[in-house]
Amino acid sequence: MTEISKLAVVNPSAQIGARVRIGPFCVIGPNVQIDDGCELMNNVTMDGHTRIGQSNVFYQNVVVGAPPQDLKYDGAPTETIIGSNNVFRENVTVHRGTELGLGKTVIGDHNLLMVAAHIAHDCILEDKILLGNESLLAGHVKIEEGAVVSALVGIHHFVTIGKFSYVGGLTPVRRDVPPFVKFDGDPNEVRAINEEGLKRHNFTEKDITDLKQAFRKLFRTGNNITENLRAMAEQENLNGHVKYLYEFLQRSCDGRFGRYLETTRKDERKHRRFRTPAELRKKV
Amino acid sequence: MAKIAPTAMIDKSAQLGEAVSIGPGCVIGPNVTLGDGCELRANVYIAHDTIVGRNNLIYANCVLGEEPQIVGELETDAKLIIGDNNTFRENVIIHAGSSRGEGQTVIGNNNYLMIGSHLGHDCEMEDNGILGNYVQIAGHCKLEHNVFLNAFTALQPFVTVGRFTFTAGASHSYSDLPPFVRASGGYPCKVRGLNLIGLQRAGFSPDSIDQLKVAFRRLYRRRDGKSIVQAVADVANENGLDEQVRYLLEFLQRSHQHRYGRYRELFRH
């Protein structure tokens, strides 16, 4: 049985599934699709072309699918796509994509986004991610599965956070975070293999030892990382996870400023013409 | 024609301009003036004694003009004044002024305040500024026009940020940031160079930028062991300085009057 509060404003053309609960003062726009079993507490706002999967929970003041904070955006009908079983705590904001990016912002399944986390335009979040309080993702960021991002972390645009990695609190992340590691501090540094996180995700002892050895070779030999990567390329029979780590680092080293996704950037310099906020307002 | 959602609550003493649009769940308190063409999305709360100019766009869950976060007694007649064409994204919180300062918080025109940014009591923000996500500006600060503060930038009370200045993400400054520069870093926040891209975008002439470059080098890349105070005095003694350079020097001279480089702190009462 779908329950919609009398004080909520739901556009008649919005598609609401079965067993959805919408609390008072929620505002749901016309092109929003909410699947079965979602729960919206009070004051949740959803806008734009937004698809929301099953059994998600949205706490107070969450805003989903608002236009991006991008001075190049001029009102294209881009999308926000959210999977199932996610929890969005109070004040979380998720923005829709932009035309020059992917055209959509995607969030997978089983993620927990804590109070006031922000997901900007064209971000991709895979599954089982934890985002701490007030963590900010700039545009075009990708977070792979099982990553833990602590509180007050700022992530630069086009950064990739590798799978099962851990980012410490208050860290300004300016370059790619490799998978399976702990990353922390300002200036930030890869600290160690995220052993606890890997154990929690049922990695075998063998995998963890292999990763630790690879980590020592890559980050603790005193040579620079490109030389260490070259040395590792000559090794055979690498563990699958080590191989993934190696390939990830290789990609990041190719990217500008250590950010692989920056190489996939579609906008050219002419697109980056700066519009004043007033000019921007006229278009949108 | 004003468009007001049925679930919005508007005080009788509030004055609404023409073509105002007020979304569902908004609460507008006493003595609030909304200029023509303002658009309030859902659940915006405007407390009291607030003047909002024309064509402002206010997104969901903003709180404007609420009493300041000050410990101690407060007078209640303080206000918030907002100019025209500003954009306030979700969860922006701006406090009214207090009797400890000017009694009013003032925001100019054409500013863009991104998600979760906060302006404390008695702040003054001029025109064309951009505040990134979660920028936290403490009380009594002044932001001159065309500033660009990136995400998580935090300022101590009484700090002034000069015009056309850019800060990197997660910069925390306890002293004034001079005009026309790039600054970054936590404690201490350091001046790294001239904000050349910002100046080019703003249409500064190449000659003017060159003059600023020369002055900047003499002020911040000193090799003669003199203090910056002395360097400012040396440059200021020269004739035929560009108008912008002169402004930079005046700004620095003002800041240097205070022990920790916060000019506005001299007027504390």
Image (cartoon, coloured by chain):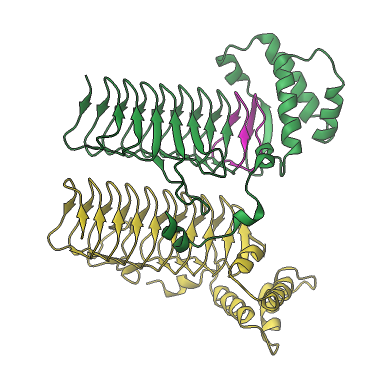
Chain colours: A green, B yellow
Q: Which residue lies at the image location 31% right of the left edge and 20% below the top edge? A: A37
Give residue B178's position: percent from left, percent from top. Answer: 58, 69
Q: Which residue lies at the image location 27% right of the left edge and 46% below the top edge? A: B43
Give residue B189's position: percent from left, percent from top. Answer: 60, 57
Is residue B156 visible to the viewer in this orientation of the structure? no
Give residue A220's position: percent from left, percent from top. Answer: 79, 29
Q: Which residues are magenta?
A: A158-183
Depth check: A59 or A65 in front? Answer: A65
Depth check: B230 or A84 in front? Answer: A84
Q: Residue lying farthest bottom?
A: B239
Give residue B126's position: percent from left, percent from top. Answer: 44, 69
Is residue A81 visible to the viewer in this orientation of the structure? yes
Main secondary structure along the magenta-highlighted residues: loop
Depth check: A107 or B138 in front? Answer: A107
**Residue A53 drawn in magenta:** no
Quadrant where the N terminus of chain A lies?
top left
**Residue A175 drawn in magenta:** yes
Q: Quadrant of residue B77?
A: bottom left
Count the labels in the image: 0
Quadrant where the C terminus of chain A lies?
bottom left
Depth check: B8 or A14 in front? Answer: A14
Q: Is residue B244 above or below residue B33?
A: below
Left or right: B139 as drawn, with respect to B151: left
Q: Quadrant of residue A86?
A: top left
Q: Is residue A155 above or below residue B59?
A: above
Q: Which residue lies at the image location 55% right of the left edge and 38% below the top edge? A: A102
Left or right: B244 as drawn, with respect to A125: right
